Amino acid sequence: MESEKPILSILGGTGKEGPGLAMRWAKAGYTIIIGSRQAEKARNTANEINQMIGGNQVQGLENVAAARQADICVLTVVHSAHREVIDSLHDALQGKILVDATARVDYRKPLPPAPPAAARLAQDWLGENVQVVAAFQTAPSSALRDLDSPMPSDILVCSDHLEAAEKILKLAQDGGMNAYFAGGLDNAIVAEGLTALLINLNKHYHVKNASIHISGIPGDGRISL
Ligand SMILES: NC(=O)c1ccc[n+]([C@@H]2O[C@H](COP(=O)([O-])OP(=O)(O)OC[C@H]3O[C@@H](n4cnc5c(N)ncnc54)[C@H](OP(=O)(O)O)[C@@H]3O)[C@@H](O)[C@H]2O)c1
């Protein structure tokens, strides 16, 4: 039943990465809240997404209000604002799952970041009452928005909270992506580093969607607990 689906907020969902995720999940029947520092900007993005998918289940709110209304929050703010935004959402995120898509890579000089992973830092800052899951670092924004083509890149999901990770695997799969559990939160530093490699590949080969594909695992990648 639709009502059993969690409400999803995409915080900083007005940029390049957030709207593609929102489109995929709205199309799959999820209720979505776009978060922004400015409620009006969030509403505008939500309206654009509703128009693109021919629906009305996407709304826009300021980030804190968006986080409070959601069951699962997905963080897609520019990486330089990672700490500032997480601090501002500390109270609103308590008791929830936070999916951190952050890859601290500079597009102009793409190098892998040093540990700890951004998502590990988020977990440390937010405390154990928030279940942080790292995911979508390998999902190029332009491919996310192309709903008519298969998603070229597989998704790596890292978390110390297996039940939360399983929910995000299902979310990714509902959004038309292959997703795999890749271990604890500290492993997310590798997913961030892969983003640097994918940007280098895009630049060298003059493409937009250099991607990774996991082989050797039968089935759809779901974990069994
Ligand atoms: N783009 C990709 O292909 C891609 C792929 C994988 C992972 N990622 C990761 O996804 C995240 C978002 O990437 P993006 O390309 O979507 O970034 P972006 O378009 O540059 O920015 C996303 C949003 O961040 C918010 N923001 C900007 N400055 C801020 C500040 N000082 N304080 C608070 N919020 C601020 C803005 O939202 P408001 O102005 O509405 O508040 C903006 O729309 C990054 O961590 C990136 O590493 C991106």
Image: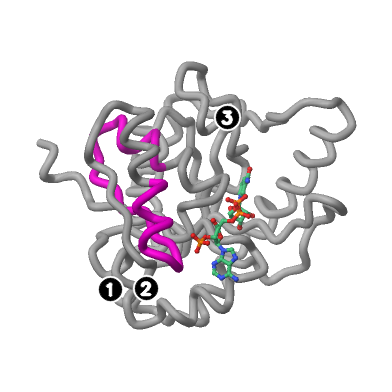
The CA distance from mark 1 to mark 2 is 5 Å
Q: As displayed, is residue 22 above or below residue 220?
A: below
Dividing the image into four quarters, tell me where ligand 1 lies.
bottom right
Tell me if 116 is positioned left or right of 64 in this view.
Answer: right
Q: Callout 3: few (<14), some (14-19), or many (20+) C-alpha neighbours within 10 Å?
A: many
Let me know if residue 35 is in the magenta part: yes
- Amino acid type shown at disc 3: Ala
Where in the figure is residue 173, as x and y percent of width and height?
39, 33
For marks 3 and 2 on the same chain, the one whose residue lies earlier in the sequence: 2
Q: Which residues are magenta?
A: 22-45
Q: Disc 2 marks which residue? A: 130
- Circle 3 residue: 143
Is the residue marked by circle 2 packed among few (<14), some (14-19), or many (20+) residues within 10 Å? Answer: many
**Residue 54, x across and y down, in percent:** 28, 26
Q: Nearer the viewer, mark 3 or mark 1?
A: 3
Pointer 1 residue Cβ closer than 8 Å to ligand 1: no
Spatial distance from mark 3 to mark 2, Cα to Cα? 29 Å
Q: Dot 1 lies on which element?
A: loop
